[in-house]
Amino acid sequence: MIENSHTVVRILPISSSFLIGDDENVLSYRINYLLNSNYRKNSNRLLLFLVLLLPFTTNSIVFEAYNPPPVDDYTTKPADSVQESFILKHKDGTYSLFVNGKFKKIDDINNELYSDLPIINETEE
């Protein structure tokens, strides 16, 4: 135990004083200085703000690799191909969409996108 007016040191069986290579007077001076001093911490407020803001900004920015969209999904079609397209009804009850000379299977025939297209029944050849 260390007091202000008189230096009283109790030797404990396990002490941390061996970690400090200085004299016991220096150690007591340091402890008294820290306990009795009235010092103000000088910190730059802008620096503290930036340090506190850093975790939030690093989690809000996400980098992703750029991949161009697939060409088949985002191609423009001329107006002629849309006017020449139709829906083909197969014998088994499934439907296919004919656009630009290609057939594509349709799962939902009741979709509003297909409402203006003519439905042609498949015939036996």
Image (cartoon, helix red, strand yellow):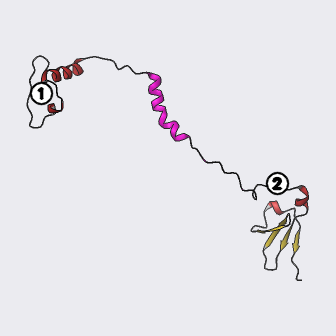
Q: Say if the magenta span includes residue 52.
A: yes
Horizontal side of 30 relative to 108 (left or right) equals: left
**Quadrant holding the C terminus:** bottom right
Q: Position of residue 39 (x, y in %)?
A: 30, 17
Which quarter of the figure has residue 96? bottom right
Looking at the picture, how far across and down is residue 105, in whole percent? 77, 69
Residue at horizontal 8 percent and vertical 29 percent from the top: 10
| Of the image marks 2 and 1, the number of the one nearer the N terminus | 1
Q: Secondary structure at mark 2?
A: loop
Q: Which residue is mark 1?
A: 1
- Say which of marks 2 and 1 sits in front: 2
Instruction: Look at the image and give the residue range highlighted in magenta.
Output: 43-71
Residue ID at (79%, 55%): 75
Callouts 2 and 1 close, C-beta under 8 Å: no
Residue 93: which quarter of the image? bottom right
Residue 115 pos. (x, y %): 84, 62
